[in-house]
Amino acid sequence: MAEQFDLLADLLELDGEEQFRVLAYRRAADQIRSSAGPVAEQALAGEAKNLPGIGKTIESKIVQIVESGEIEALTKRKERVPAGVAEFLRLPALGPKTARRIWQDLGITTMEDLRKAAEAEQLRSLPGLGAKTEERILKALEETAKPREKRTLLAKALPAVQAVVEVLREHPASNEVSEAGSVRRRTETVKDLDIIATASDPAALTEYFTKLTWVSEIKAHGKTKATVVSHDGLIFDLRVVPPDSYGNLLQHFTGSKRHNVDLRENAVKRGLSVSEYGIKDVETSEVLTARTEEELYEQLGYAWIPPELREGAGELAAARDGELPELVELGDLRGDLHMHSTWSNDGKNTLEEMAEAAKALGYAYVAMTDHAHYLREGRLEAQWSEIAELNGRLEPFHILRGIEVSIRADGSLDMPDDVLAECDWVVASLHSAFDKSPTERLMTAMESPHVDCIGHMTARKLNRREGADIALEKVFAKAVETGTFVEINSQPDRLDLRDTHARAAAEAGVRLVVNTDSHEVDALAYAELGIAQARRAWLTKDQIVNTRTWKQIEKLKK
């Protein structure tokens, strides 16, 4: 469904249609991809138009897809614009106007024909196109043919960019230095790592940046800009900007494309033109700059918007109307309710080491949730004896008698009910057979009176496997009905639930838990990633279960 809206946007762009229509279809595609609910069913019921980015017109087009397989407008456009021409827009070297000229003036309609024409130097016959354009197109075609690179996990990118920011702040020429881009928004994966700075001597700061010991390649270097590659393949972009417009540049290079487009469109309605360099009053030509983001947003009539929310998902309206949520903070967590020790074969630290590390973080409790299939033949009772002994020594810190059970293909759990009834905390998770009725299995598990929480619900692994195909709306409704909590798993390659799904869960009334699923002491730090995911989901402290004391949680349990 989303692909049809993306293709329609491409063909409209090639046909020279107004940009607002193109953007509307791209927004619809984004919304459909990220939606936790069945958009097709909602459209048939006349309810999809209540979703952000989907109005009555787009809702009717979704109905057309359901009823006839394709958007009627798309069918008509495909008759006018060859399908291969739309692929031209995937090349960063080609904009829609140039792609249209190549198609209409030279009759080129496929990527292969485009390559041949560029190699034969035919493209330069068009006014405004020269040898450099042909070179860029050939390079872009070569890059497109390569296997798609996996994006970097936030867990790898975040400490790297934070370390570079700290090093740059120590340089005598630097004044302000901040991470920017997708890493500042804490997206689950990132591409390049952006850094924005001000300096008394910009050239000295960029020179210092390119000479750092971890730099393996300098891709670009100027007085105010530099791009370098680290030994482990991370790409860092540093931009040194004037202090008076630091807020403008930082906002521009932090906001997602949708956020920035929405910001500019709303400004146009008020007679303003927003760029990375300032806010221009179209009538008077006066340009306002901002030293801080707070100043910039205030000039446009908004409260400051936390970076994690800058995704074009209603945050501007909320900021204008004073309705932004007070987002949960890492320091709000009082405990971790999903972790493993050497009692699980995949755990690397002892139960005592895990507990001591959690206590050192300031936690009041943890649930030791080793895998059920490792705790048979008296091992569970032996673990409980160790927990009792440790609780006596670590008081008032408290270790809960937890367990992680697997949800089998028939929806049953891999530990008897009488044993689960003795546990303080039970996490139930899908670990295999992800294509076998995952929705029904999750809902069956939730009906157990002993299951407190569903772990890593979709079982996705970033860059490795898609999540199970789950009817999330039904599962969230069952969670509310049964009083089952749902986990945001902080493991770097999981971050499961994803942000938009966690937001939908909270809006449905589900209570969420931010857990690390740690298998070693160092992994307890992944709580920062889980909290970032919760913040991207617009979640508050009250919506996260383990911001409470254990006594308060006990009252919320089934």
Image: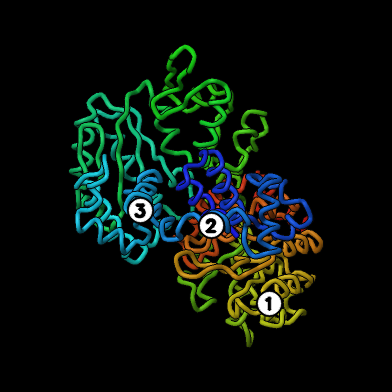
Q: Nearer the viewer, residue 403 or 461?
A: 461
Q: Nearer the viewer, residue 138 or 109?
A: 109
- The quadrant in which the N terminus is found is bottom right
Is residue 168 shown to the viewer in this render? yes
The three-letter code of the residue at mark 1 reads Ser
Q: In x, y percent, where is residue 218?
A: 20, 47
The image shows residue 449, relative to residue 487, as above or below, that is below
Q: Could you tell me which residue is drawn at 71 percent across and 47 percent down? A: 49
The image shows residue 290, relative to residue 189, as above or below, that is above
Q: Quadrant of residue 430?
A: bottom right
- 49 relative to 334 in the view: left or right: right
Q: Tell me the tag on residue 358.
A: 2
Q: Tell me the tag on residue 231.
A: none
For marks 1 and 2 on the same chain, the one whose residue lies earlier in the sequence: 2
In terms of secondary structure, where does tag 3 sit? loop
Is residue 214 shown to the viewer in this render? no
Disc 1 from disc 2: Cα separation: 36 Å
Q: Tell me the tag on residue 91.
A: 3
For marks 3 and 2 on the same chain, the one whose residue lies earlier in the sequence: 3
- The quadrant in which the C terminus is found is bottom right
Neighbor class of circle 3 (other Cα within 10 Å; few <14, some 14-19, many 20+) is some
Q: Which residue is mark 1?
A: 437
Q: In x, y percent, where is residue 234?
A: 31, 53
Q: Nearer the viewer, mark 1 or mark 2?
A: 1
Disc 3 from disc 2: Cα separation: 49 Å
Query: Disc 3, disc 1: CB below 8 Å?
Result: no
For marks 3 and 1 on the same chain, the one whose residue lies earlier in the sequence: 3
Q: Nearer the viewer, mark 3 or mark 1?
A: 3
In terms of secondary structure, where does tag 2 sit? helix
Q: In x, y percent, where is residue 146?
A: 31, 65
- 63 relative to 94 in the view: left or right: right
The three-letter code of the residue at mark 3 reads Leu
